[in-house]
Image: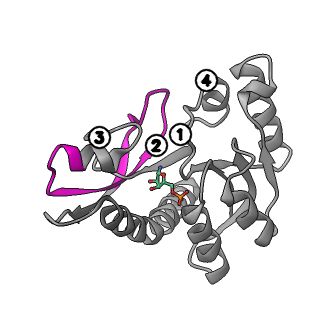
Amino acid sequence: MKRIAVFASGSGSNFQALVEAVNAGTLDANIRLLVCDQPSAAVLLRAQQARIDSFCSSPKDFADKTAFEMEIVQQLKSRDVEFIVLAGYMRLIGTTILQEYPESIVNIHPSLLPAFPGKDAIGQALDAGAQVSGLTIHYVDSGMDTGPIIAQTEIQIHSNDSRDDVQKRIQQAEHICYAKVLQELFTKETTNASP
Ligand code: GRF
């Protein structure tokens, strides 16, 4: 069973979907910690209700980003976390965490990368008049939504769609895909590790 931490900054609907997949037995993982950088984020309440530990802090509580990330690494290591799942975490992961978790951090982004990286990917897609967008699950590197792509799902955008319509459709797909792709990844890793 993979020991994971989820990093999130906002509502946490993806976090919730992962918790439900674990509870349903479709994701073979143990969510050891929620890392959050926004004290008022709804995801913290979700963690509390799911009885999952959370660590909430932001770089401004520390001398610099390195000190902030060293504290996060300490929180992760003290719970034997092996793998990090970003789910709406609105911060770039820095070298301190990247070096401790090589090829062990993934992110979900609401566009078909490399199209529309960064903030408000859905707004960017609508502004560009895209008829297709979707979601991407990818490994995390030091760039903004630039790491190697693991999986993508397309979502159609209709001409009369509001921003909310598109966001709802993408998030529904995210909630199904993230747990599924993680499960495939963890199963593959276990198989590869076998003699
Ligand atoms: C998701 O759409 C994800 O793709 C993006 O941030 C959003 C987080 O939503 N990275 P939620 O907090 O999981 O509801």
How far apart are the alpha carbons under marks 1 and 3?
23 Å
- Residue extending farthest to the top is 63
Q: Amino acid at mark 2?
A: Tyr
Find disc 4 in the rendering and name its residue.
95
- Was residue 136 drawn as part of the magenta stretch in this picture? yes
Kindly identify the amino acid type of the residue bearing the numbered disc 4: Thr
Question: Of tags 4 and 3, which is closer to the observer?
Answer: 3
Which label belongs to residue 37?
none
Q: Which amino acid, by three-letter code, is at mark 3?
A: Phe
What residue is shown with label 2? 139
CB under 8 Å between callouts 2 and 1? Answer: yes
Report the residue marked by disc 3.
Answer: 116
Asked if residue 138 is among those painted magenta in the image, a careful observer would answer yes
Q: Quadrant of the N terminus?
A: bottom right
Image position of 61 with respect to 33: above or below? above
Mark 4 or mark 3, which has the lower sequence index? 4
Region of the chain picked out in magenta, as a range: 126-151
Cα–Cα gap, marks 4 and 2: 14 Å
Disc 4, ligand 1: is the CB inside 8 Å? no
**Of the image marks 4 and 2, the number of the one nearer the N terminus:** 4
Q: Amino acid at mark 1?
A: Glu
**For numbered disc 4, what is the local secondary structure?**
helix
Callout 1: few (<14), some (14-19), or many (20+) C-alpha neighbours within 10 Å?
A: some
| Crowd tier of the residue under label 4, counting other residues whose Cα lies within 10 Å: few below 14, some 14–19, many 20 or above | some
Residue 108: image location, x then y, percent: 45, 52
**Percent position (x, y) of residue 157?**
19, 62
Callout 4–callout 2 Cβ contact below 8 Å:
no
